[in-house]
């Protein structure tokens, strides 16, 4: 036997002994079997509107949940993209919808543009589905009054008070929201109406079809007819509600909340009262006599937190469609008069006034610039005058002769001719 062949046979023999010994002494790691969870499978027929279940999770560790989710197959049915959505409403309603959407995508997906776009598409899909609210803010904050069971967890777990986004993160989220409300479509999620992270298992998961994964989020749609495009045909509403908990990060909701508070204050005004205000900002005065029970006049305490630029809006809401209206407001309830006429101190501390007389074309808004400086000085209450009734003139039998100016020295005047007199008749 040749030496090379002997070496090969020796090596083979050594491997035959060493490899089994290595396997025995170093066994491969066996994956820990995850807890099996049996969830009911249910297809909702077209005749029955599916119920939206509260968010509740199966008691699994994150590792077991990930293993369970990995075994759930993706649906093999078609996954068409949703139709573009375009918000139709006023600028104020669009601003509130945009900030609700921005809060939803940012707090749910984090500062991740693709994840935010996926969440935004789910919000729009819910908006069009009859099982969910009709407004963007209504969809995102559905169930916010409950400590558990809200549809988007950030709205009821105090996330808004525990974390404030940076300016850049909020700007990016608002850009995603604005695009979604202007027709942008995130095609991969199709008509998905539900999602969750892969480290939890909600009880509703088995009742829906798993359609796509976006990073760590899994997206689902209704089974049967309710998950098909024809089901997403509900007419939406642009009457976006005011979400008080968004006020710290949203100017749109902060302003709307302040206006709502102001309207409440106006409704609670005991009665409309008269007032008189004059200003050097215009040449004419407004001689408006105070009248008891005058429904065209208001004396109001301004709610705290309202920006001065919004005072005309409050006045316009109070005056409504009145042809003539007088609105005066104070920031200090202790100085707000309960009736007219006004005292000098009440006039001096008045923060804002609004006058309207459509018959004469008068419409004037004035601020107390000592309290609220204005760039346009013509908007300032440079002088406020409290008008009171003047006493009527007293009649007298003695004729009053108008006296002209005294003779001016150094001026030569033509001599007046002497008057002719008639004897017995004085002055003639």
Image: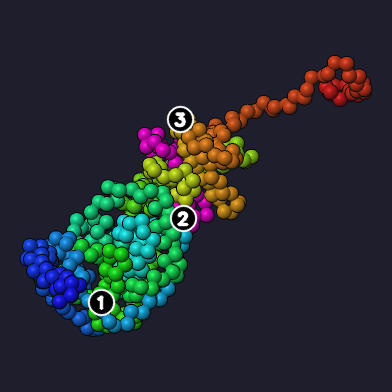
In the image, residue 329 lies at what x, y percent?
Answer: 44, 41
In the image, residue 186 lies at what x, y percent?
Answer: 39, 70
Could you tell me which secondary element the residue under label 1 belongs to?
Answer: loop
User: Pointer 2 and pointer 1: residues touching (CB < 8 Å)?
Assistant: no
Is residue 330 rendered magenta in the image? yes
Q: Is residue 337 left or right of residue 278?
A: left
Is residue 76 rendered magenta in the image? no
Quadrant of the image occupied by residue 86: bottom left
State the residue at coordinates (52%, 51%).
324
Q: CA distance from mark 3 to mark 1?
A: 74 Å
Range of magenta residues: 316-343
Q: Which residue is mark 3?
A: 345
Q: Is residue 168 something one can see in this rendering?
A: yes
Q: CA distance from mark 2 to mark 3?
A: 29 Å
User: What label sits on residue 259 in the rendered view?
Assistant: none
Image position of 119 with respect to 257: above or below: below
Image position of 102 with respect to 6: above or below: above
Q: Which residue is mark 2?
A: 320
- Quarter that holds the N terminus: bottom left
Image position of 254 with respect to 117: above or below: above
Q: Is residue 221 left or right of residue 30?
A: right
Q: Earlier in the sequence, mark 2 or mark 3?
A: 2
**Please, which residue is most extreme toward the top here?**
409
Q: Which residue is mark 1?
A: 74
Q: Earlier in the sequence, mark 3 or mark 1?
A: 1
Image position of 317 with respect to 190: above or below: above
């Amino acid at each position: 036997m040749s030496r090379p062949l002997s070496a090969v046979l020796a090596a083979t023999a050594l491997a035959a002994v060493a490899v089994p010994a290595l396997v025995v002494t170093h066994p491969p790691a066996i994956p820990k079997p995850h807890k099996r969870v049996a969830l009911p499978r249910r297809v909702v027929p077209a005749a029955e509107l599916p119920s939206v279940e509260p968010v509740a999770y199966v008691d699994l560790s994150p590792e077991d949940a990930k293993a369970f989710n990995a075994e759930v197959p993706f649906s093999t049915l078609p996954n068409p993209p949703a139709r573009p959505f375009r918000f139709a409403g006023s600028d104020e309603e669009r601003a509130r919808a945009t900030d609700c959407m921005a809060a939803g995508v940012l707090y749910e997906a984090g500062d991740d543009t693709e994840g935010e776009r996926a969440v935004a598409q789910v919000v729009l899909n819910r908006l069009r589905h009859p099982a969910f609210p009709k407004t963007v803010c209504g969809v995102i904050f559905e169930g916010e009054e409950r400590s558990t069971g809200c549809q988007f967890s950030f709205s009821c777990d105090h996330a808004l008070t525990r974390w404030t986004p940076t300016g850049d993160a909020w700007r990016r989220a608002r850009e995603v929201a604005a695009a979604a409300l202007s027709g942008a479509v995130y095609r991969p999620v199709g008509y998905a109406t539900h999602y969750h992270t892969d480290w939890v298992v909600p009880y509703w998961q088995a009742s829906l079809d798993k359609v796509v994964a976006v990073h760590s989020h899994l997206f689902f749609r209704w089974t049967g007819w309710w998950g098909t495009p024809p089901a997403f045909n509900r007419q939406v509403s642009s009457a976006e509600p005011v979400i008080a908990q968004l006020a710290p990060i949203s100017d749109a909701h902060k302003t709307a909340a302040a206006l709502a508070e102001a309207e409440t204050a106006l409704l609670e005004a005991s009665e409309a009262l008269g007032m008189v205000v004059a200003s050097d900002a215009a040449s004419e005065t407004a001689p408006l006599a105070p009248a008891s029970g005058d429904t065209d006049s208001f004396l109001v305490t301004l709610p705290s937190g309202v920006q001065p630029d919004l005072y005309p809006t409050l006045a316009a809401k109070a005056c409504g469609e009145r042809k003539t209206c007088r609105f005066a407001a104070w920031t200090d309830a202790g100085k707000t008069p309960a009736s007219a006429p006004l005292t000098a101190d009440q006039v001096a501390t008045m923060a804002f006034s609004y006058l309207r007389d459509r018959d004469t074309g008068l419409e004037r808004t004035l601020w107390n610039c000592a309290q609220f400086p204005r760039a346009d000085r013509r908007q300032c209450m440079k002088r406020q005058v409290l008008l009171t009734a003047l006493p009527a003139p007293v009649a007298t039998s003695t004729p009053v002769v108008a006296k002209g100016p005294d003779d001016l020295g150094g001026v030569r005047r033509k001599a007046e001719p002497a008057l002719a007199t008639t004897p017995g008749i004085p002055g003639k």
